Image: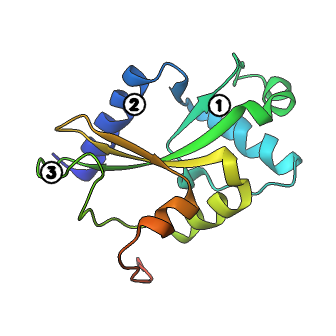
């Protein structure tokens, strides 16, 4: 399975496990970008995959999103299909983009990383500071595309 296929499967698994997690339509994602910008919180659309809503919010209505932004957590999914990963994802190697790092720093408690093993069903949710505390090594890099 491709990495995009694994990521899509991981998002679907999360929505099945947690009814508060939602996969966004294009308009809903656009409304989130606008709403956060109006609250002086810059987010990048490719720095999150799904959201968790702690209140029923009409994400297609920009005013509803703005008024309820404190009830929205952005989630970046890091997925794998390797069966030899334990529930703590020991030995898991993953990339963290600059956009993800900046949005996580900017939103604090309203941003999470969820690691998903699509083969075992294991999930692990962490804040940015918890990732750094758990890390055994950090290897900065720039990925460039022409």
Res 138 quadrant in image: bottom left
| Relative depth, front residue between 133 and 143 | 133
Q: x, y (%) of residue 145? A: 41, 76
Q: Are marks 2 and 3 in contact (CB under 8 Å)?
A: no
SS assignment at label 1:
helix
Task: Check disc 3 and report the residue beneath it.
Answer: 82
* Residue found at x 38% / y 67%: 95
Q: Nearer the viewer, mark 1 or mark 3?
A: 3
- Sequence-first disc among 1 and 2: 2
Image coords of residue 59 (percent x, y): 69, 25
Q: CA distance from mark 1 to mark 3?
A: 32 Å
Give the spatial CA distance, label 2 vs label 3.
17 Å
Q: Residue at x 71, y 39 (%)?
A: 32
Horizontal relation, residue 142 to residue 26: left or right: left
How far apart marks 1 and 2 lie (CA) works out to 18 Å
Question: Crowding at label 1, few (<14), some or many (≥20) Cα neighbours within 10 Å?
Answer: some
What kind of element bears circle 3?
loop
Find disc 1 in the rendering and name its residue. Answer: 28
Q: Position of residue 129 (x, y in %)?
A: 57, 63
Does 90 appear above or below 116?
Answer: below
Residue 146 at what x, y percent from top left? 41, 79
Q: Which residue is mark 2?
A: 14
Res 110 → quadrant: top right
What residue is drawn where x is 34% and y is 40%?
A: 123
Compared across the picture, whether 6 is left or right of 68 comes to left
Identify which residue, 135 or 8, lies in the foreground: 135
Q: Is residue 65 above or below residue 119?
A: above
> Above or below — where is 130 with respect to 60?
below
**Count of marks, rendered view:** 3
Q: Which badge, 1 or 3, is on the more N-terminal residue?
A: 1
């Amino acid at each position: 399975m491709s990495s995009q296929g694994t990521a899509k499967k991981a998002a679907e698994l999360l929505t099945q496990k947690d009814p508060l997690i939602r996969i966004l339509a294009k308009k809903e994602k656009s409304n989130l970008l606008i709403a956060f910008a109006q609250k002086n919180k810059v987010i990048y659309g490719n720095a999150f995959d799904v959201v968790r809503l702690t209140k029923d919010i009409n994400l297609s209505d920009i005013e509803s999103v703005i008024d309820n932004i404190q009830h929205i957590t952005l989630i970046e999914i890091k997925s794998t299909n390797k069966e030899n990963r334990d529930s703590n994802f020991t030995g898991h190697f993953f990339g963290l983009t600059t956009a993800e790092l900046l949005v996580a720093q900017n939103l604090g408690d309203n941003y999470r990383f969820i690691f998903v093993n699509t083969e075992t069903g294991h999930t692990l949710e962490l804040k940015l500071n918890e990732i750094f505390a758990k890390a055994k090594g950090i290897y900065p890099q720039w990925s460039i595309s022409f």
